C-alpha cells in the first residue's frame, strides 16, 4: 500500500470483496485482523449520479462502488481532482452560465440591461465586444458578459432573483462568488479541494446548489421588462 500510495484497499475472500483495510490501521499481524466490514452509506451503486458521490464524500474520505451486485471499485476525494470529474463540473458551470445568459436576454432584449451594470464592468464588456468585432467575430454584447456580470443583473432584478430560490441576496451573492472561484480553479487547473471554494464540505454544498439551480433555470421563462 505504501509503495502504491494507497490509503484504502479492498479485501477479497473467495473471489469476492467483503471488506477493506485502512493503511494507518494495519499492524504486524495478518491483514484480516484489521479488516473493516462495509457499513451503510459506504457503498454506492455504479448507476449513482456523480452528485451522489459528492454528497457521500462530504462526511467520509472514500466510498465503494457496487458493480453487478458486488463491490468492485472505490472513489476517494482525490479522484474528484481527475479530468473526467473536472470536465463534468466545468460542464455544469457552463450550462448554468448559458441559462443565466438566456434569462438575461429574455428579460432585457437588445442589450437593455446596461443600466444594471457598474461603469467599470460595462466598459470591460464593451472592450471584449470591440475586440471580437475587430476579429470579425459574430457576437452580441451580452456574449461578452462574465459570470459575475450575469449574476449581478439577475440579483438586481426582483423577478429573476425570485427565480433563483435563494432566501436572501447575501446568500445568492456568496454562492455566485464561490461559483466564479470554482470556475477559475477548473479553468486554470488549480486544486479544487483546497481552492477558492474553501474546504471539502463547502465544495460539496456548492456543487449540490449548482445542480439544483441549473434545474430551476432550465424551466424558467420570463417576460421582457417593460
Image (cartoon, helix red, strand yellow):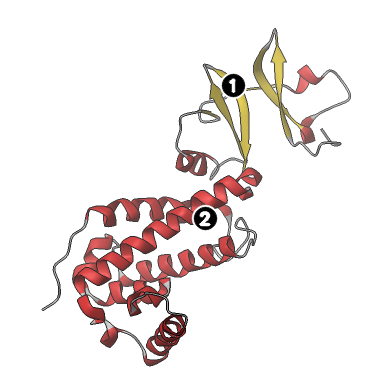
Q: SS for tag 1? A: strand
Q: Which residue is mark 1?
A: 71
User: Does residue 115 appear left or right of residue 10 in this picture?
Assistant: left
> Which residue matches tag 2?
203
Where is residue 121 drawn, in percent x and y? 41, 86
Extreme residue in the left direction: 226
Residue found farthest to the front: 136
Residue 93: percent from left, percent from top? 44, 58
Q: Quadrant of residue 72?
A: top right
Q: Residue at horizontal 23%, vertical 82%?
A: 112
In this view, 196 is above or below 120: above
Q: Is residue 211 visible?
A: yes
Q: Is residue 17 left or right of residue 91?
A: right
Q: Residue at x 43, y 79 (%)?
A: 136
- Spatial CA span between label 2 and label 1: 27 Å
Q: Is residue 145 visible?
A: no
Dot 2 crowding, Cα within 10 Å, few <14, some 14–19, many 20+: many
The quadrant in which residue 209 appears is bottom left
Mark 1: few, some, or many residues within 10 Å (few <14, many ≥20)?
many
Quadrant occupied by the N terminus? top right
Total tally of numbered discs in the picture: 2
Q: Residue at x 34, y 51 (%)?
A: 212
* Element under disc 2: helix
- Counting residues from the start of the chain, the first of labels 2 and 1 encountered is 1
Residue nearest the observer in this picture, 144 or 103? 144
Instruction: Give the position of the C terminus as an image quadrant.
Output: bottom left
**Residue 56 at what x, y percent from top left?**
51, 39
Amino acid at each position: 500500500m505504501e509503495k502504491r500510495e494507497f490509503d484504502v484497499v479492498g479485501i477479497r475472500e473467495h473471489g469476492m470483496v467483503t471488506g477493506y483495510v485502512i493503511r494507518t490501521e494495519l499492524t504486524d499481524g495478518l491483514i484480516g485482523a484489521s479488516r473493516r466490514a462495509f457499513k451503510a452509506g459506504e457503498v454506492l451503486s455504479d448507476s449513482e449520479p456523480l452528485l451522489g458521490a459528492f454528497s457521500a464524500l462530504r462526511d467520509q474520505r472514500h466510498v465503494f462502488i457496487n458493480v453487478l451486485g458486488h463491490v468492485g471499485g472505490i472513489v476517494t476525494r482525490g479522484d474528484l481532482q481527475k479530468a473526467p470529474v473536472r470536465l463534468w463540473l466545468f460542464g455544469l458551470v457552463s450550462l448554468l452560465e448559458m441559462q443565466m445568459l438566456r434569462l438575461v436576454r429574455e428579460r432585457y432584449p437588445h442589450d437593455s440591461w446596461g443600466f444594471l451594470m457598474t461603469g467599470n464592468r460595462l466598459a470591460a464588456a464593451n472592450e471584449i465586444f470591440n475586440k471580437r468585432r475587430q476579429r470579425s467575430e459574430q457576437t452580441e454584447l451580452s456574449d461578452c458578459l462574465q459570470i459575475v456580470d450575469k449574476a449581478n443583473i439577475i440579483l438586481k432584478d426582483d423577478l429573476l432573483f425570485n427565480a433563483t430560490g435563494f432566501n436572501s441576496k447575501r446568500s445568492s451573492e456568496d454562492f455566485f462568488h464561490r461559483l466564479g472561484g470554482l470556475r477559475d480553479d477548473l479553468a486554470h487547473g488549480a486544486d479544487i479541494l483546497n481552492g477558492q471554494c474553501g474546504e471539502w464540505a463547502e465544495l460539496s454544498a456548492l456543487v449540490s446548489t449548482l445542480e439544483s439551480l441549473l434545474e430551476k433555470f432550465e424551466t424558467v421563462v420570463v417576460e421582457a421588462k417593460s
